[in-house]
Image (cartoon, grey):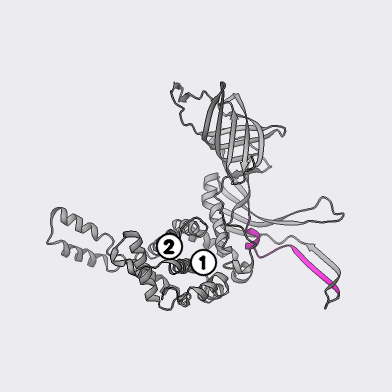
Amino acid sequence: MDNIEKQYLGVWWLPDSPENKVGGLLNFYKNKEITLELVGTFSSLFNYKKGKTTYISTKREIVKYPIILGYLSGENQKITLYECWPKKYSINSGLSTEHLNPSVVFLGAHFNSLDEISFKKIKIHYDALSYFLKDSGFKVKLKTINPDEFILDEYSLTYSYPESIDISLEEVELKFNFEINLPLSIKNEMVLSEKPFIVINSEFTKTLDDWINDYIDPLRFLLSFSTMMPSIVQNLNVYIETENNPVEVIFHQQESKIKQLPMERIDKLFFIEEDVKDLKRLIFLWFKTFVKYKSVFDLFFNIEYSPKLDLKNKFLNTIQALEMYHREKYKNHKNWDDEIFKKRVGEILIPFSGKYRKWLKSLTRYANEPNLNERLKLIIESLNGTVNNLFEDQSLFTKSVSDTRNYLTHNNPNLKNKILTGSDLFWASEKLMFILQTSFLTDLDFTFDEINKILNRNERFKNMLLFGKQSIN
């Protein structure tokens, strides 16, 4: 019970069986898990339906309920549970119970079919959004009697709503805006809190999964990339066209276990107020870049914000992300022209036939692509010197990284004495992550001068120069 953050008693039923109502508790846990504990079941534990036929089984059939409807007791609030997976069931003294894990909770609406769960408008608040945006409506003015001793005579706090930021993308309109929570009592204390949010309007209805994959997650990753801290959705509302009131959406998020420290300036990669000349263009380029490198970003953020990832796997995953990035960005980069390569392979295969020819040909599958050492050199060269101060010897770095990856992947004993270990492996992983981050910055149209300014100001980068520059040598 200590892990339960909120708990609601309610009555629940399936859309096609409203007469069969079951009581149960809806629990929201501190680890963001959601459970529904039913006192009873929607059907016999050992009977299940397929179409119009009811079957009897000696064991419980695994049933996922696409939709469960309910009302919260005492509040008469409509609620829809979406994609409810079975967790456990039991029979005690003739009483059946069933525990489920809903993937999504909709507070404020009933959706009787999957087709109804689609929307044209959403409103999102991210925990890191206030650190990302430039503007705040708060203005503070101090008046002192004695400036040397800082004795206050007057403290003035005013608030004016900042201007909204409107951005047009293909199919959708984004609006960055602000709201403020006003105090109910101002006798001895006044607490004002500003909350920035994003409203997205679409030309077409979209499912929740589409909203998450196409907009909610990409924007969350942008905040994480900018602030160099994990970001989560704190509030999400969707809007039904036939109703004015928003529907609150709660879903399980893989929140990072890294402690959310105050985001001081030194923690951030780039600042909207200093480094971004055109926020609208940045957002446009981010969505374009995110779609192009989706698998690379997924791997990048998994590496960056998975505290349990051991050093070797962090190194290998970072290498994989860089290889994927290079392969996607330079699709046509090959060692030889296709016709020349095909001719060379043909000449090599002339003396062989049968199974040996087939086996040998399979070895040439990636022979026309640059190897890891060459890919790393090409990426570093494309960054125009912005990361050169990471290395005493760039060639030694790329060669050591390649040898280490090849040993860890293929366990080649000839490379055992050449691999990076301990602190060398740690700093190599850090350098590779900054190479990847810098590459992303170029895709977002940051100039090399701007990138130099960003990196040289960053505390993590400065620590790497101080402690890790000579680690491989």
Q: Does the magenta stretch include residue 138?
A: yes
Neighbour tally class for label 2: few under 14, some 14-19, many 20 plus, Cα within 10 Å = many
Residue 413 vs residue 11: left or right? left
Magenta residue span = 124-145
Q: Which residue is drawn at 36% across and 66% down?
A: 404
Residue 315, labelled with which disc?
2
Query: Depth check: 124 or 94 in front?
Result: 94
Quadrant in which the N terminus appears: top right
Answer with left or right where residue 443 lies relative to residue 332. right
Please indicate, yes or no, whether residue 141 appears anywhere in the rendered image. yes
Q: Where is residue 5 in the image (x, y as percent from the top left)?
A: 65, 43
Coordinates of residue 326 in the picture (x, y in percent): 39, 65
Q: Nearer the viewer, residue 387 or 195?
A: 387
**Residue position marked by numbered label 1 in the rendering:** 444
Q: Where residue 263 appears, x then y in whole percent?
A: 63, 63
* Amino acid at dot 2: Phe
Q: Which of marks 2 and 1 is nearer the N terminus?
A: 2
> What is the spatial separation of the Cα atoms under label 2 and label 1, in whole angstroms?
25 Å
Q: Could you tell whether 57 is left or right of 100 in the image?
A: left
- Tell me, yes or no, if residue 207 can be seen here: no
